[in-house]
Image: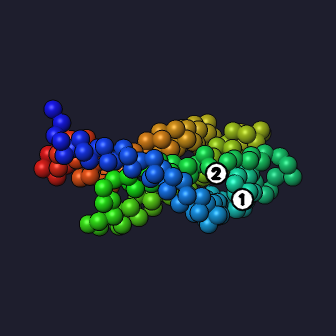
Amino acid sequence: MPSNTRTGELRVFLRRLPLALVGAVILWALARPVYAPALCATAQFLARVFEVPPASAIVLQGGDAVLGRTDMRAGSGWLKFPLTQIHFNLVPFLALVLALPHPLSSGGWRRLLLAVAILASSHVLALLWQLKYLEAFSMGPWSRANYSDVARNVYGTLRYFFDIPVTFALPLLLWVGIFPKQVFALVGLGDPVRR
């Protein structure tokens, strides 16, 4: 039977969650104009590190990333990809964190920054794998000539792994992993350090 304290904390968390969601959406909307260009530039840099010639391109166009190669003829093999699909998972993560009781006390800021850095890294990799998938599968004979079957399978697997499991599971895993004491207390599992 759940304790009254835990039930009370859970009720407070559930009452705070809608307001925390609104706050998370506002933070996300404010960060997007700075975050999207940094995301595109970082992913393009990583894509070009080992390329000769460095021709992979990620161009920001509104809220979308336009993926392609600069060494191909104009209009061939370019894909417009919505960046929201990659970085929207910041919203549920921030909402879950902001709804916790005292999430930023006792080193919570450092843990929050670590979690956001992990999410940002996953966003860069997700965009990079989208680009590599496009190059490996969608550029006709050029793709077949420049990517082996193994490389194509690896990039396909990475793309789908980052599209579905990472996008949807990582925010929840980070929330539990970065704030275990508060989360375990909410669900009545006790102190995770003692387990």
Q: Is residue 140 above or below residue 62?
A: above
Q: Considering only order in the chain, which callout, 2 or 1, is on the residue closer to the N terminus?
A: 1
Q: Nearer the viewer, residue 58 or 72?
A: 58
Amino acid residing under circle 1:
Leu
- Left or right, 57 with respect to 24, comes to right
Q: Nearer the viewer, residue 90 or 128?
A: 90
Residue 76 percent location from the top left of the image = 83, 46
* Residue depicted at x 59% and y 58%: 29
Q: Nearer the viewer, residue 145 or 63?
A: 63
* Residue depicted at x 55% and y 49%: 88
Within-10-Å neighbours for mark 2: few <14, some 14–19, many 20+: many
Residue 162 percent location from the top left of the image = 52, 44
Label 2 sits on a secondary structure element that is loop
Say if residue 49 shows up in the picture: no
Which quadrant is the N terminus positioned in?
top left
Q: Which residue is mark 2?
A: 83
User: Can you tell which quarter of the image residue 47 is in?
Assistant: bottom right
Say if residue 133 shows up in the picture: yes
Residue 104 percent location from the top left of the image = 33, 64
Q: Are marks 1 and 2 in contact (CB under 8 Å)?
A: yes
Label 1 sits on a secondary structure element that is strand
* Residue depicted at x 23% and y 41%: 7
Q: Is residue 27 above or below residue 8?
A: below
Which residue sits furthest top? 1
Q: Which residue is mark 1?
A: 60
User: Can you tell which quarter of the image residue 57 is in?
Assistant: bottom right
Q: Nearer the viewer, residue 86 or 93?
A: 93
Within-10-Å neighbours for mark 1: few <14, some 14–19, many 20+: many
